[in-house]
Amino acid sequence: MKNIHFSENLVTVTKNKYIFLDTCFFLDFVKRGEEFDNFHKKLLPFVADFLTTKTVELEFLKGSQDEIAIKAKGEFLQKICPTRIQITGDGFRSSDFKKLILRFKDWGKRLSYTDLSLAACLQKWPKKAMLLTSNFKDFPLKIFSCEAVFTLHENANVKTYCLYQLK
């Protein structure tokens, strides 16, 4: 994991938490397999579970060229993150989304349904859920707190991931 560096508190803040994974995590995992697999295995004993939403699953499957690619991506998701939350069920109500939209205010105009669904999961389980994403623009710090970070170093590029929790 020489090209992945994480904050010292990563294990501590994720202990017994549900970690929701954004699409960007899966896309980078595919590109950087072994390093991400080691990272995933390092956290696995500490977290309650890795989760995602059905909308993230659909975003990840987009661009697949055939059934074989869709099947391979589906198996990959199942291995990394076997539980996917269906936002239209699983106890989510329309009023929950309206409260969240009001918290985002103008920021919410550019929010995708996928990001809104991830934020709704953090709202539903505020003390137990965290979101791992590199999409800072979609999760403003006035609504979310960044509890830990990890960075990916690749040649001259650096990409930062943050573990967010709803304030």
Image (spheres, rainbow, N blue to C red):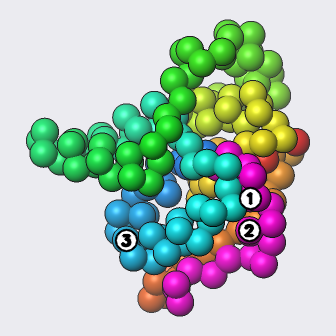
> Dots 1 and 3: beta carbons under 8 Å?
no
Query: In the rendering, at what x and y percent does residue 138 appear?
Result: 64, 45
The quarter of the picture where residue 45 lies is bottom right
Reading the chain from its start, which is encountered first: label 3 or label 2? 2
Query: In the rendering, at what x and y percent does residue 76 appear?
Result: 33, 52
Q: What's the residue type where badge 3 is placed?
A: Gly
Q: Find out whether residue 6 is within the magenta segment.
A: yes
Q: What's the residue type where badge 2 is placed?
A: Val
Distance from the alpha carbon under mark 1 to that under mark 2: 5 Å
The residue identified by callout 3 is 33
Find the magenta span and give its range. 1-19
User: What kind of element bears circle 3?
Assistant: helix
Residue sitting nearer the eye, 111 or 121: 121
The residue lying furthest to the top in this view is: 94
Residue 137, placed above or below residue 46: above
The numbered mark at residue 136 is: none
> Dots 1 and 2: beta carbons under 8 Å?
yes
Q: Residues within 10 Å of mark 2 (few under 14, many from 20)?
A: some
User: What kind of element bears circle 2?
Assistant: helix
Q: Residues within 10 Å of mark 1 (few under 14, many from 20)?
A: many
Q: Find out whether residue 152 is within the magenta segment.
A: no
> Dots 3 and 2: beta carbons under 8 Å?
no
The residue identified by callout 2 is 11
Distance from the alpha carbon under mark 1 to that under mark 3: 22 Å
Residue 113, placed above or below residue 18: above
Residue appearing at x 38%, y 48% in the figure: 77
